[in-house]
Image (spheres, helix red, strand yellow):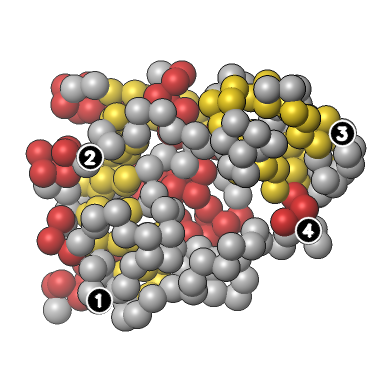
Amino acid sequence: MYREIVIVRSGGDVASGTIKRLHEAGFKVIVLEIENPTAIRRTVSYSQCVFDGTVTIEGTTARLCRTLEEVDDAHFKGEIPVVIDPKGEMIDIIQPQVLIDAILAKKNLGTDKSMADIVIALGPGFEAGVDVDAVIETNRGHNLGRVIYEGKPQANTGAPGNIGGYTVERVIYSSGNGEIKVFCDIGSLVEKDEVIAEVEGKEIRSKIKGVIRGMIADKTHVFKGMKIGDVDPRNEVKNCYGISDKARAVGGGVLEAILHLQMKDKE
């Protein structure tokens, strides 16, 4: 038995933690994506459906759909439909009970409370009670996953979260503009200063020892300074293929917010 329809804008890794949790809780989820998503943690991002057709994360499968009939068929099969819809046109067509802005753009790209009965956003750029009904804290730390019903989440710090004692050192950025050539893809164990990719002949080296947890797809066109991957110093290869603690915490916050706002509406 399905609960209400939920549309989630974005199928990135953090969004996918929410998508899977809502699907497992019985919600009928539809994911909207852009034409060429550039997810770093591709092995745990439903956005990969755009390229691969289907993606299975921890036993839950999503499928790329191009028509409403295919969306219905995916739901009938217990799958999560992913639709290429960068403008969110399906929101007006489906009129979901719940809309989740999981784009993580650090700013509001046009989401407002009039778009669904319940509108929830992830991370900075939104104000709960003003442009959305609730915001979920996405910054690592004591408040990760906290539901905010009035006010704003923590501002974007510009610094990656601390994992194993490393912050900026674990993030990989492009060395130039052009097509990237990946040497060490997701799941590879690397040493400090090892060459893991190159862009137009310019080497990209790992700043720390660890496992490549995220890496943009080979042959993607990138620009200098663009985030293209991350190294996990914990060396747990299995973590490359499972939803992260951060994504689970955020997904739990979204589920809590939906149920709370539904009960509030019934009062």
Residue topped by disc 1: 129
The mark found on residue 246 in the picture is: none
Residue topped by disc 4: 166
Element assignment for label 4: loop
Q: Residue at x 17, y 38 (%)?
A: 90
Instruction: Name the N-terminal-most of marks 1 and 4.
Output: 1
Q: Quadrant of residue 94?
A: top left
Can I make out residue 214 in this image? Answer: no
* Above or below, 87 relative to 49: below
Q: Residues within 10 Å of mark 2 (few under 14, many from 20)?
A: few
Q: Where does residue 255 sit, x and y in percent of width and height?
A: 37, 60
* Above or below, 29 relative to 167: above
Count of numbered badges drawn on the protein? 4
Q: Nearer the viewer, mark 3 or mark 1?
A: 3
Drawn side of residue 138 relative to residue 100, left or right: right
Q: Where does residue 54 sit, x and y in percent of width and height?
A: 43, 22
* Above or below, 149 relative to 56: below
Residue topped by disc 2: 87
Q: Quadrant of residue 178?
A: top right
Element assignment for label 2: loop
